[in-house]
Image: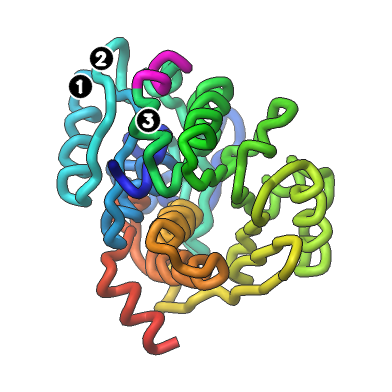
Amino acid sequence: MSKVVILGVFVADASYRADRMPRMGETVMGRSFALGPGGKGSNQAVAAGRAGADVAFVGRIGEDTFGDMAMDLWREAGVTPAVQRGGGATGSAFIFLDAATGDNAIIVAPGVAGTISKADVEAEAALIGGARVFVTQLEQPMDTAVRALELARAGGATTLLNPAPAADLPQGMLTLCDYVTPNESEAEALTGIAVTDLASARVAGDALLAAGVARAAVLTLGAEGVLFHAADRSVHVPAVSAGPVVETTGAGDAFNGGFATALSEGMDPVEAARFGCALAGLSVTRAGAAASMPFRAEVEAVLATG
């Protein structure tokens, strides 16, 4: 069985770099365009695979060129696909990149991945429940994510929810999660607490634990790194700088893939968060989402110098 199993979405990222976003009815000239693989779940699987994990990806893609792109990507990254093909088109994402800062704004249309059902994940119950670490996000249907978490919990897997994009969660969903990894805006959406610094991040972390998260809330804070917040310890893990920032797309996915990989290897959770920060720190020094995910040797080199 795979040590890390990830349920999620693959989409083809269409990235546009420009000086600013256009207003409604306006056209602006872009500085560059790129088409490449993306989708939070797939990005996380690629991050885990390149970081050395035995990882499988559960999802759905089309019988089309974008679907072929996904299969090629997973083959290169060492990801085992547990995917169904057909039933519609593979999804895509529009990504605006600020030419000055590298910050992004994204619209995701998941395509056929948005139709993955509870029955589909139940067909992979042995794979999901047999994992050491199971990861999901919120780009696929919510009830499918909940059912997958139930299967993972029943099988004894450590469960990790990356609650992105921000959404209202059904009652009890957080009780199925050992770890939850929101960014600042996602933490606010879940708790109603604006996360502006470490103190407010700890308050939000307390709220997530009170809502049923079993082990820790791991709040990703961009350039400030990560807050690992559990009942018995609250540790600020600084960001890992690996060079000038080129693009932040995929940084959160790099963290989650790295964190899951380290947990699957039995690493202490705080050290696992540091490992995830190293992946994220490397990913922002290069363009692309899946394309920016570093390999294990790069991560170890950065950690050795830090």
- Image check: 68 left or right of 145? left
Which one is in front, 113 or 160?
A: 160
Task: Measuring from the top left, give residue 41's x and y in whole percent.
Answer: 41, 40
Numbered marks: total: 3
Task: Measuring from the top left, give residue 63's x and y in whole percent.
Answer: 20, 19
Callout 1: few (<14), some (14-19), or many (20+) C-alpha neighbours within 10 Å?
Answer: few
In reply to whether residue 236 is colored magenta, the answer given is no
Measure how far apart labels 1 and 2 are at the Cα level.
8 Å
* Residue at 21% across, 44% down: 73
For residue 135, above or below residue 204 = above
CB-based contact (under 8 Å), mark 1 and mark 2: no
The residue under label 3 is 92
The residue under label 1 is 64
Label number found at residue 276: none
Which one is in front, 83 or 22?
A: 83
* Residue at 52% across, 69% down: 268
Please identify the residue farthest to the top as the structure is shown. Answer: 87
Q: Which residues are magenta?
A: 118-123
Task: Name the quadrant of the N terminus.
Answer: top left
- Camera-side mark, 1 or 2: 2
* Residue at 52% across, 64% down: 101
For residue 237, above or below residue 63 = below
Task: Evaluate whether residue 19 shows in this view.
Answer: no
For residue 198, above or below residue 114 = below
Which one is in front, 263 or 12?
A: 263
Q: Amino acid at mark 2?
A: Gly
- Image check: 162 left or right of 188? left
Q: Amino acid at mark 1?
A: Asp
CB-based contact (under 8 Å), mark 1 and mark 3: no
The residue under label 2 is 86
